[in-house]
Image: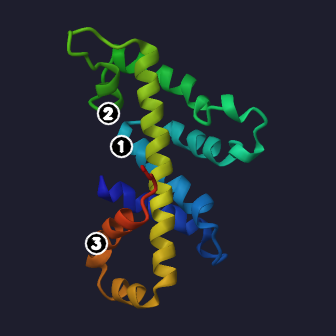
Amino acid sequence: SEANFVGIADRLIDEFAETRAVELVRDYGVPFAGLVIADLLGVPLEDRAWFREMFSTRPRLDQVEDRENYNPLSFLDDKFTEYMIERRASPRGDVLSEIANATLSDGSRPTLEQVVTIATFLFGAGQDTTARLLASAMRVLAERPDLQAQVRADRGLLPDLIEETLRFESPTKVN
């Protein structure tokens, strides 16, 4: 819910507010997006710190020797396999339960591996694109003091700012 997202944002800002310094993507964008996506999917509260830690400590692509075979989301497989098994046995009314118990057009159920792949992709892709969008919006505000002043004066402009940032600075590009 929106209240959960505001609470997540406030807690993260509290972590760096006293130092008055932040590396926006690493310290705010990635953890915020990850925690929001976790909330939307139905990741248990007790596991969210683990996800945050894993996303903050995973190697960057330039740190990996075998880049061709590197899957940056492979660390999610075991955790999401556990979730899919649990949700198939006891659905909880969340997105993970919907994925775990989905049926194909012929009435059959996807394999466990297939639903795990979908869940990990949703989690990873949602986290990455959201963090990039936040960074792009902040860059726009930093480069446009006039726009920043408008948004500060009227917070109702935030949805339009996000939409326009997404349109012009999309975190995913397709040619």
Residue 59 is left or right of residue 3, and the answer is right
> Residue type at mark 1?
Leu
Where residue 101 appears, x then y in whole percent? 29, 19
Real-space Cα separation, disc 1 to disc 3, in angstroms? 23 Å
Outermost residue toward the front in this view? 175
Q: Name the residue: 30% across, 33% down.
A: 94
Residue that carries the numbered disc 3 in the rendered image: 160
Q: Badge 1: how crowded within 10 Å, few (<14), some, or many (20+)?
A: some
Give SS at disc 3. Answer: helix
Real-space Cα separation, disc 1 to disc 2, in angstroms? 7 Å
> Residue type at mark 2?
Val
Residue that carries the numbered disc 1 in the rendered image: 40
Where residue 138 appears, x then y in whole percent? 49, 73
Q: Badge 2: how crowded within 10 Å, few (<14), some, or many (20+)?
A: some
Real-space Cα separation, disc 2 to disc 3, in angstroms? 27 Å
Where residue 4 appears, x then y in whole percent? 36, 55
Residue 95's tag is 2
State whether residue 108 is above or below residue 128: above
Q: Name the residue: 50% across, 56% down.
A: 131
Comparing 141 with 88, the one in front is 141
Quarter holding residue 83: top left
